Image (cartoon, coloured by chain):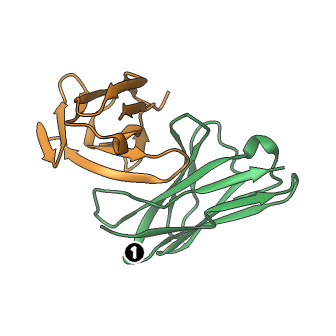
Chain colours: A orange, B green
Amino acid sequence: SQQGEEDPQALSIQEGENATMNCSYKTSINNLQWYRQNSGRGLVHLILIRSNEREKHSGRLRVTLDTSKKSSSLLITASRAADTASYFCATEGTGGFKTIFGAGTRLFVKA
Amino acid sequence: GAVVSQHPSWVICKSGTSVKIECRSLDFQATTMFWYRQFPKQSLMLMATSNEGSKATYEQGVEKDKFLINHASLTLSTLTVTSAHPEDSSFYICSASNRGGTEAFFGQGTRLTVV
């Protein structure tokens, strides 16, 4: 499969709680990106982390990257109902320029 | 960030007809564009990679005669779904990157419904 794996597949939390999503991939990468997609809509780019970076922050988002384990995590702190969406990780491999998407995590934040 | 415009945002067509979807980079030259397909509640699956002025490279399992891709200029790529059937109904998204860029920018997507 061209896709990486993400877990959990679905996550339901209360507003104010933190949400953690994980992503694993299979090949060497140049960078890894996280996207959000609201139901039936286009993608919103959240954050990009390069292969030589280990952690990155953007507002309530924190992304980590462990290239030795070929994994990344996305932490959303103090979640809001508006964070309800599907979240995808996507990797750009070193062998080409294709961006390959993981299976995604569906996050539901209850108000 | 750079802007990629995709048109139309949604289209309904009759089975057997062809549909063209356009992907334009508005403020940069896109040397490479990618086309993805997304079925409901699933992830984005890469269909093909197109480089300006050359033939597209299709992923395994994607019929190149059914999904015609043209990247005739540095700002426009088109995907034509030929002889569309209901099973082609899906969300199609393009992305574009510029020369030497390390990030791809995505269009808004096109929802195709074949009836």
In the image: residue B71, left or right of residue B30 = right
Regarding residue A6, the answer to whether it shows in the image is no
Q: Which residue is mark 1?
A: B29
Inspect the image, locate mark 1, and give the three-letter code of the amino acid beneath it. Gln
- Residue B80, quarter of the rendered image: bottom right
- Residue B88, quarter of the rendered image: top right
Query: What kind of element bears circle 1?
Result: loop
Q: Residues within 10 Å of mark 1 (few under 14, many from 20)?
A: some
Q: Is residue A28 above or below residue A45?
A: above
Q: Residue at x 33, y 67 (%)?
A: B99
| Camera-side residue of A37 and A92 | A37
Q: Is residue B35 above or below residue B46?
A: below
Q: Residue at x 64, y 54 (%)?
A: B111
Residue A82 x/y as whole percent: 36, 45
Residue A52 x/y as whole percent: 12, 41
Q: Residue at x 85, y 59 (%)?
A: B17
Residue B95 x/y as whole percent: 46, 58
Figure disc tally: 1
Q: Chain of mark 1?
A: B
In the image: residue A55, left or right of residue A73 = left
| Camera-side residue of B46 and B73 | B46
Q: Residue at x 56, y 34 (%)?
A: B41
Q: Is residue B18 above or below residue B38?
A: below
In the image: residue A107, left or right of residue A65 = right
